[in-house]
Amino acid sequence: MTDPKNQLVGLNVDALVKASIRRNPVIAKAKESLDESYVAEPKPFKQVSELVSQKTKDSHTELYKKYVETLNGVSAELDTAERSSADSKHSDFRSLKLDETFNLNSVWLHELYFANCFDPHSEITMDSKAYMRLERDFGTFEDWQKDFMACALSAGNGWAVCGYNMFLKRFINTVVSNHSQDVMMGLYPLIVIDMHEHSYYRDYLTDKRSYLVAQMRELNWVTVEERFLKAEALHEVLK
């Protein structure tokens, strides 16, 4: 049997790829219009709450904006990064791709968090999609709360996330460390709470539980319900 490695000796792989693209007009057209870099814009969030100080809100917003700025810088660098020298041990391209995931996750997680918290009139009804689905997959709504809070208190500097898992086809709670570690594949996030120290230390010192209870009391169930409806649509597509 011929060794596959021997078949590549002397071949110009870059030329073969280019030739393949030229033979396929659809791929060629996509290649011509490809723009690798993208620009993120920071979104405004009111963060209406008496349970978190204005100083914490302001510093958290500034931190979020810095992640957006860093993400845009990484995206611009990736646009011209040298692909041919990519290496799994160390290369500029590898470092940039890791930075991209770290900063992109941070931006998205912060936006999800800001949008689904800080509702002083928080209320969930038993006939809402969110309540019914969490009750179905966790036994009771109270059991979901206990499991979610356990995830949050286990997070360290990270995130507690309730989401729809596309592989399990059910709703689950999970922990994300930092912004890009221990990320569960196939997860569509629905409820996100920031458990990094910068979220609570100024107001609650090391009392993470009191901070968490405050966040749970002010969950914006209107926003969460919209996400659950999208998750239901996703579930139907994946059937």
Image (cartoon, rainbow, N blue to C red):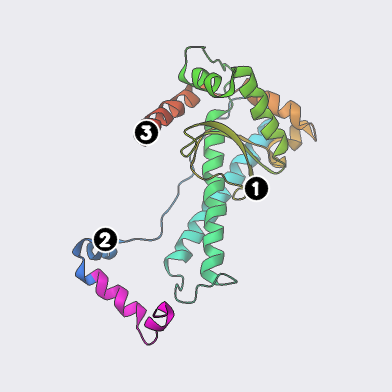
> In the image, which disc is placed on residue 30?
2
Earlier in the chain: of badge 3 and badge 2, it is 2
Amino acid beneath label 2 = Ala
Q: CA distance from mark 3 to mark 2?
A: 30 Å
Looking at the rendering, the stretch of residues picked out in magenta corresponds to 1-21
Q: Nearer the viewer, mark 3 or mark 2?
A: 3
Q: Position of residue 81 (x, y in %)?
A: 46, 70
Residue 177 versus residue 216 in the image, above or below: below
Residue 86 versus residue 175 in the image, above or below: below
Residue that extends furthest to the top in the rendered view of this protein? 126
Amino acid beneath label 1 = Asn
In the rendered image, which residue does mark 1 sit on? 178
Say whether residue 219 is left or right of residue 203: left
Please give the name of the residue rendered at 55% of the width and 19% of the height, measured from the top-left corner.
Answer: 135
In the rendered image, which residue does mark 3 sit on? 239
Residue that extends furthest to the bottom in the rendered view of this protein? 10
Q: Secondary structure at mark 3?
A: loop
Amino acid beneath label 3 = Lys
Earlier in the chain: of badge 2 and badge 1, it is 2
> In the image, which disc is placed on residue 141?
none
Q: Secondary structure at mark 2?
A: helix
The magenta stretch spans residue 4: yes
Would you identify the image quadrant in which residue 116 lies? top right
- Is residue 57 visible in the rendered image? The answer is yes
Mark 1 touching mark 3, by CB under 8 A?
no
Mark 3 touching mark 2, by CB under 8 A?
no
Please give the name of the residue rendered at 31% of the width and 79% of the height, measured from the top-left corner.
Answer: 15
All told, the count of numbered labels is: 3
Earlier in the chain: of badge 1 and badge 3, it is 1
Residue toward you, 140 or 226: 140
Q: Main secondary structure of the magenta part?
A: helix
